[in-house]
Amino acid sequence: MKKGIIVFLFLFNVLTLPSQSFLIEAESFDTKGGWVVDPQFVEQMGSPYLLAHGLGEPVENAEMEVKFPTQGKYHVWVRTKNWVPGEWEPPGRFQVRVGEKVLDQEFGVTPGWSWEYGGEIEISERETEIELVDLTGFDGRCDAIYFSTEEKVPPARGEDLAQWRFEVTNQKNVPEKVEHFDYVVVGGGIAGCASAIAAAEQGLKVALIHDRPVLGGNASSEIRVHTLGIYGHFERILRMLDTKHYPNGSPEAYAEDRKRHKNVEKYENIHLYLNWRAYDANTDDDVIESVDARHTSTGERIRFEAPLFADCTGDGWIGFWAGAEFMYGRESVDKFDEGWEEFGELWSPEEPDGVVMGSSVLWRTYKDDKSYKFPEVPWTKDVVGDFAADKGTWHWEYSRADMHQVHDAEEIRDHMLRAIYGSFANEKKKPGNEQLRFEWVSYLVGKRESRRLIGDHVFTFNDARDQTQFPDSVVVEIREVDVHYQQNLKDASKPDFLSKAMFYKTGKYYIPYRSLYSRDIKNMFMAGRCFSASHVGLGGPRVMRTTGQMGAAVGLAASICKKYGITPREVYKEHLDEYMNLVLSQNEKVN
Amino acid sequence: MLKLATGILLFIGQIAFLQGDTAFIEHNPVMAVDGWDFSDVSSEKPAFLLTDDSTLIEYDVVMLSDEEELPYAYTSEIVTPVCDDTLCALMNIRVYWNLLGNYVGFDTVAGKPLTKNDHIEFRNNDYVKLHNLLMDDNSIIKRKAKKELFDREKNRVSELVDAVTGATAKEVKEAVVDGALYSCYTLYHIVHGPLSDSIQSDMERHFNTSLQEKLLGSQHADYQLYALKSLNKSDFMSYQDRIIELINGAIPLNRIYIMKKMPAEMWRNVDFQLDIVKGFEDFDVNSRTHLLNYIYKSDVINFKSIVELAKYLFLMTRNQVKVYVRILTKEKSKVSPEELELIKDMLKGVNTQHGYLFNDLTW
């Protein structure tokens, strides 16, 4: 696939550009070796990229066969960044081999995403192999490589870069391939999977779009958070998707992945699009007409058309692109009257702010049967100090007043990686830990809170505390309202990557269906942490069995929408009895 | 500083004597939170009696006052069973709370040391651990019901239930005194339970301007925040000197609270603004962010503040440097040509990892 694209690009460039130039997207390398595709930050830095996540040991080379337009001299630029700038050797350094020659320049040395110049190289054979050669195993990253006969550096970032990319790769933002469904679910976490299953069981043709190779989101083996909460009315569906209560970070997550995939894949009317990341929601008169998605490696694009969409992205991307109203940060204590004196400002502030619960990056170690030396990591010192640890738990969490959990997610992930590598290095120095090794460190940000899309009802702390029952109660939960704060707020000497939880115990509480569809986008549901809730309201139901309940509930609502050709709101207004009967009937189907 | 008293000290810690008409105990708890010294206590009087509805145990709470006759702290001698069955011993302990009902220390009662299972007496390190547990107002055992921790199938109620496994069991074990889970649990919930709320309510009956100023001037973070919350925005103007002191010396939570509550006219005061900016280096990262944001939002920005902040660019995060760039962009048309040149020169010599962000700045 990629080679075809390269040849096509070459022809295009020959015809339209005075110079010979072409771009290789790193994520499209034929053989990725030990490098992994990281599509988490596309909206911020422009593209999926390859990451050398070797936990301190250089990863195997990524390889690609390239056909140059002509023989001759080419200038080389690599888009990359020094992810920990400072008074030390950049940790994520790598080199590029072109044919037999390894470029002298080491990449990954400049702060901020930019094009690092690799010099001029003589290409004597048009068909040449390119390799990425990792030097450290510490998360070097390569977005793209650009070859040009002209010495002109491409735009560094932003709109200029995006436009340049379209031109140089001859890609169009609008996909040529269009597919049609009854219901498009974006996001393959527990909420998205449950929604796809619930709708598919009612006969809908469903597209489930997910930007990772495995389903499960925060519950997947890539992030490894166990599922909490109760099953509510959807035990049968959620048992197909959830996890046991193993410690967070446990490799038991792999078995749960297999279970989840087997269960989702058995539905013939669920069309699974793994490694596809949505990038736009085309909206007219507050109706989403289609969602565009792009393959995270090949760059292929598809337009998904449907009358109904579910935003299960966690970050509320579909709603965001469609122009839906959303909330972010902590509301003032008075906005929804959510005060709890015991924790005061930590719980709900007098003045609103942009603070949210943080993200976790989980990790795990084991004792090997032989000693192992971990490299020096001076670039972690200002994060960890002398703090030492041999594993991460839920309270390894990062939130900071100047950081947005969506816009700054890469920096959040990177800060957590420094926290992990540094704490592990300190732990290794303790006597008896010579055999301690990393088993696994996630490179995905496990988020708790980001955008919350606004529905006809905003679920708040009061709904949980007062155990308000609604005519459209479709989600039931008993889990405490559990809101986190960073430990360094109360004690500045604490590591900034550790949090504390505040638990408000409550009895059974309910989430209404009206919190699960958009107030202003007429055909969009939301399930997962981006559902309609206040900051404190999210504290309880943000866990994955609960979000799974949300997903299943909207999947069923989608079937009522289809049956009558109506909007999500009209389900509540005109067909509530039928809908609630359908929801409650799920209880009877428990095996 | 934790006070590790010897056994002898435990017994002489409370000496009853008469002061005026009131029987008075000298308070010298064996364990006290940092910064708590009871030598200033000059009088005490009964505050209230609280009965625990579930156990019918009565708590006689006493208010301690300082030499200025302002409330200083509260104390009560707790007597509670340490087991569910009558065979177990009673626990006797004197507990101290501050005026907000937050735990500040405890003392043993003469001749009645705390005991673990099998009536083994607490050792000094056990008292320290109990103190650490009680100081943690958000301990894991706070949110655990008894039934989640104790195995009633076994004779000894102090064993963790088998169901409490993994991280939770480890966290609980780390928090409590080994072999004294039930004592710890019981005492923790007395100390942090309804008594705590009742104490704050009692203090509020005595709350006046003198007490407000005492709390505002206190070194204790919880007192500061309580007093700050009791001030309205215009009161902030009256207490400017203390506000500046607190911005420079308070914990991050309080500092951020102040900055959020400070009226715009305080931010507009160029001298005041500069005073705050000078503290940037000693602020935590979150306070720095709030400071930069409020400077940016202020309709009056002191040129000296801009220059002062430039000294700390090397400490700023990427997003903080972005805010600084926005401040420069906002102000560049307001400063004189000489000042503009000064800023340009200054930026040339700046040491920051995020200097590339200045590339987007047009002059």
Image (cartoon, coloured by chain):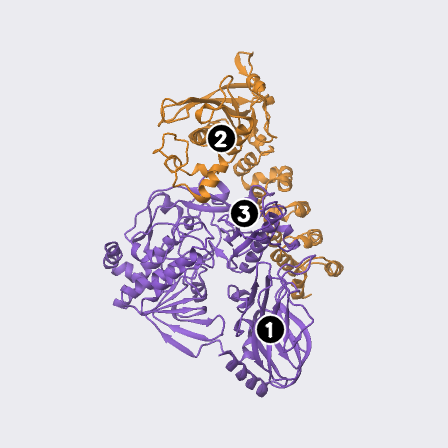
Chain colours: A purple, B orange
Crowd class of label 1 (few under 14; some 14 to 19; many from 20; radius 10 Å): many
- Asked if the residue at tag 3 contacts the one at tag 1, i.e. Cβ–Cβ closer than 8 Å, the answer is no
Which quadrant of the structure image shows residue A191? bottom left
The residue beneath circle 2 is B101
How far separated are the C-alphas under marks 1 and 3? 38 Å
Q: Earlier in the sequence, mark 1 or mark 3?
A: 1
What crowding class fits label 3: few (fewer than 14 Cα within 10 Å), some (14-19), or many (20 or more)? Answer: many
Q: Secondary structure at mark 1?
A: strand
In the rendered image, the residue lying farthest to the front is: A369
Q: Secondary structure at mark 2?
A: loop
Residue, far bottom: A15
Query: Where the C terminus of chain B falls, by quadrant?
Result: bottom right
Q: Position of residue A522 (x, y in %)?
A: 36, 65
- Kind of residue at disc 3: Leu
Task: Find residue A213 and report its horizontal and vertical position in percent.
Answer: 45, 66
For mark 2, name the chain: B
Task: Using the rendered view, name the quadrant where residue A276 is placed.
Answer: bottom left
Query: Looking at the rendered structure, which numbered label has been put on residue A131?
Result: 1
Q: CA distance from mark 1 to mark 2?
A: 65 Å
On the question of residue B291 being in view, the answer is no
Nearest to the eye among marks 3 and 2: give it. 3
In the image, residue B148 sits, relative to residue A542, either above or below, namely: above
Q: Is residue B140 above or below residue B16?
A: below
Amino acid carrying label 1: it is Glu
| Badge 2 amino acid | Gly
Q: Residue B11 versus residue B85: which sits nearer the camera?
A: B85
Report which residue position mark 3 lands on. A498
Label 2: how many Cα within 10 Å (few below 14, some 14–19, many 20+)? many
Q: Secondary structure at mark 3?
A: loop
B251 horizontally vs A331: left or right: right
Where's residue B173, x and y in %?
Answer: 47, 37
Q: Nearer the viewer, residue B355 or B205?
A: B355
